[in-house]
């Protein structure tokens, strides 16, 4: 992630250095202190970007693992259904829904008439 603030501060630092490499605008505004703060901000930004990239890698791994666990879970349920039957209490206890208790969708027949203007 880029930081407009840090980019602008680096440009300002370079411009101030061009005016005077030892510029000091008072006790709290020396150029060297400003450059140090900009460098620290850039280092924090780099660390942030690294952590962000690692988090993205973990997210990809988690999504992949979730898909594998979902597939395994479905296979486990199918196995219980194959051994104990899909209408058994055990099948229902492990999360299966007997097919006779499933809600059925109403299938509407396609209309044979079409509107023409």
Image (cartoon, rainbow, N blue to C red):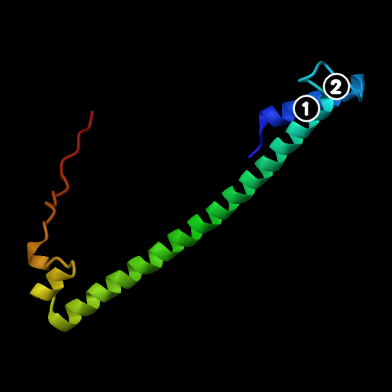
Residue at (66% x, 33% y) in the render: 3
Residue 102: x and y, percent? 11, 61
Residue at (74% x, 32% y) in the render: 38
Q: Is residue 87 visible?
A: no
Classify 103 as above or below 14.
below
Classify 50 as above or below 38.
below
- Which residue is tagged 2? 16
Residue 10: x and y, percent? 78, 30
Sequence-wise, the earlier of marks 1 and 2 is: 2
Residue 73: x and y, percent? 30, 70
Q: Quadrant of the N terminus?
A: top right
Q: CA distance from mark 1 to mark 2?
A: 10 Å
Say which of 46 and 61 sits in front.
46
Cβ–Cβ under 8 Å for marks 1 and 2: yes
Say which of 36 and 13 sits in front.
36
Q: In which quadrant of the rendered view does residue 117 lie?
A: top left
Residue at (13% x, 50% y) in the render: 109
Please indicate whether residue 92 sits to the left or right of residue 21 in the image.
Answer: left
Say which of 51 and 67 sits in front.
51
- Which residue is tagged 1? 34
Classify 32 as above or below 48.
above
Q: Is residue 114 visible?
A: yes
Say which of 10 and 33 sits in front.
33
The nearer-to-camera label among 1 and 2 is: 1
Residue at (76% x, 37% y) in the render: 39
Residue 16: x and y, percent? 85, 21
Q: Residues within 10 Å of mark 2 (few under 14, many from 20)?
A: some
Q: Residues within 10 Å of mark 1 (few under 14, many from 20)?
A: some
């Amino acid at each position: 992630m880029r930081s407009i603030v840090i980019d602008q501060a680096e440009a300002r630092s370079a411009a101030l250095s061009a005016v005077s490499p030892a510029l000091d605008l008072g006790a709290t505004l020396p150029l060297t202190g400003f450059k140090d703060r900009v460098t620290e901000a850039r280092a924090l930004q780099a660390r942030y970007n690294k952590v962000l990239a690692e988090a993205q890698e973990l997210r990809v791994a988690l999504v992949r693992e979730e898909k594998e666990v979902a597939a395994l879970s479905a296979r486990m349920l199918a196995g219980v259904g194959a051994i104990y039957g899909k209408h058994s209490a055990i099948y229902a206890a492990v999360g299966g829904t007997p097919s006779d208790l499933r809600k059925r969708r109403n299938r509407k027949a396609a209309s044979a008439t079409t509107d023409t203007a």
